[in-house]
Amino acid sequence: MLISRHASRHGGRIHIASIPEVDLNLWQEKDQEMIQNLEAKYESMESSEEWIKAMKEGFHLFKTYMQSLSDEDFLTKKTKPFYLEEGETQAHWLVEEVSHLFHHRGQFFNYLKQLGYDVNMFDLYV
């Protein structure tokens, strides 16, 4: 598969697959070592099937966490990733998550177009 060959030339990592799980752990204030271990887990994956499964599992964890928050916690509870000086609310992190995924989805779409794949706007928004 093209994605697997391309990814293995670039260290075996598909960043977009790791976003839900890694970002969730960042926003739950896990330390740098924990985040690096998570990233290493994704870097060791070799097939698109592994990435898809891991992304779905990460999304499930992220969704479960967000749904577990009370309205008050969602709007007022602040958490701070290890690399920031100040925290943000869980509502803010949800917007960050969606923005991050959409950013990389757009990059992936453009990459497929540049490689000559027959993709169009319907593929992007379905």
Image: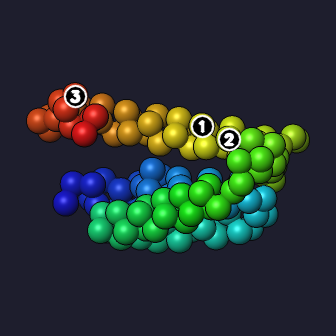
Q: Looking at the image, is mark 2 or mark 3 nearer the viewer?
A: 2
Answer above or below: position of 73 versus 39.
Answer: above
Q: Disc number at residue 76?
A: none
Residue type at tag 2? Ala
Q: Looking at the image, is mark 1 or mark 3 nearer the viewer?
A: 1
At mark 2, the secondary structure is helix
Residue 30 % position (x, y): 76, 63
- Taking the image as shown, residue 68 lies to the left or right of residue 110, namely right
Q: Are marks 2 and 3 in contact (CB under 8 Å)?
A: no
Residue placed under numbered mark 1 in the picture = 95
Q: CA distance from mark 1 to mark 2?
A: 7 Å
Residue placed under numbered mark 2 in the picture = 91
Q: Are marks 1 and 2 in contact (CB under 8 Å)?
A: yes
Residue placed under numbered mark 3 in the picture = 121
Residue type at tag 1? Val
Is residue 97 at all visible to an observer of this figure?
A: yes
Answer above or below: position of 74 versus 63.
Answer: above
Q: CA distance from mark 2 to mark 3?
A: 29 Å
Which corner quadrant holds the C terminus? top left
Q: Are marks 1 and 3 in contact (CB under 8 Å)?
A: no
- Taking the image as shown, residue 105 lies to the left or right of residue 103, namely left
Residue 114 % position (x, y): 23, 31
In the picture as drawn, the residue positioned furthest to the right comes out as 85
Q: Quadrant of residue 69?
A: bottom right
